[in-house]
Image (tube, grey):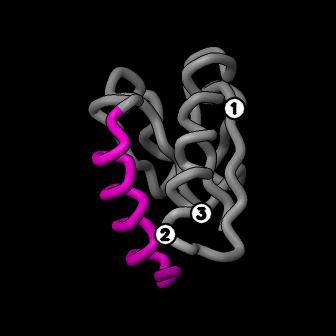
Amino acid sequence: MKIMAMCSTGLGSSFMLRMNIEDVVKELGLRDVQVEHSDLSSASPTSADAFFVAKDLEDAAQGLGDVTVMDSLIDKDELRAKVKALAERHALA
C-alpha cells in the first residue's frame, strides 16, 4: 500500500506528516506500507492508495479517492487513530 502525505507545496508540512505517518506505521507494525509526500497539484488518483491532507486542503483533495483529512498535522493521537482506521479499511491490520 502506498500512502501520500500532501500539502500545497510538497515541502514542509507534507514532509513532516510523512515522517509522522512512517513512525505510526512502524509503531503499529504494519507491513508493506510505503509513505511518500507531494504537493497537491501533482497528485492524481493513481499516485497512491490513500492520501493524507490538512483540513484546509480537504475540498481540493476530493476526487483523489481514499482521502484522510487531518484536523491537526502535529497531533500524534489523531494521526494514530486515522492510520489505524486506514489499516482496517484496507485490511492491513
> From mark 2 to mark 3, how far is it between C-alphas?
5 Å
Q: Secondary structure at mark 3?
A: helix
Q: Quadrant of the N terminus?
A: bottom right
> From mark 1 to mark 3, how far is it between C-alphas?
21 Å
The residue stretch that appears in magenta: 75-93
Q: Is residue 31 left or right of residue 80?
A: right
- Where residue 31 sits: x, y (%)? 66, 76
Q: Amino acid at mark 1?
A: Ser
Label of residue 26 in the image: 3
Q: Earlier in the sequence, mark 1 or mark 3?
A: 3
Q: Residue furthest front?
A: 27
The tally of labels here is 3
Q: Is residue 71 left or right of residue 24?
A: left
Label of residue 28 in the image: 2
Q: Secondary structure at mark 1?
A: strand
Among the 4 quarters of the image, the one containing residue 38: top right
> Which secondary structure class fits the magenta region best?
helix
| Residue in front for this viewpoint, 31 or 14 | 31
Say if mark 2 contacts mark 3, CB within 8 Å.
Answer: yes
Q: Earlier in the sequence, mark 2 or mark 1?
A: 2
Q: Which residue is mark 1?
A: 38
Q: Is residue 55 left or right of residue 4?
A: left
Say if mark 2 contacts mark 1, CB within 8 Å.
Answer: no
Q: Residue at x 61, y 61 (%)?
A: 49
Q: Amino acid at mark 2?
A: Leu
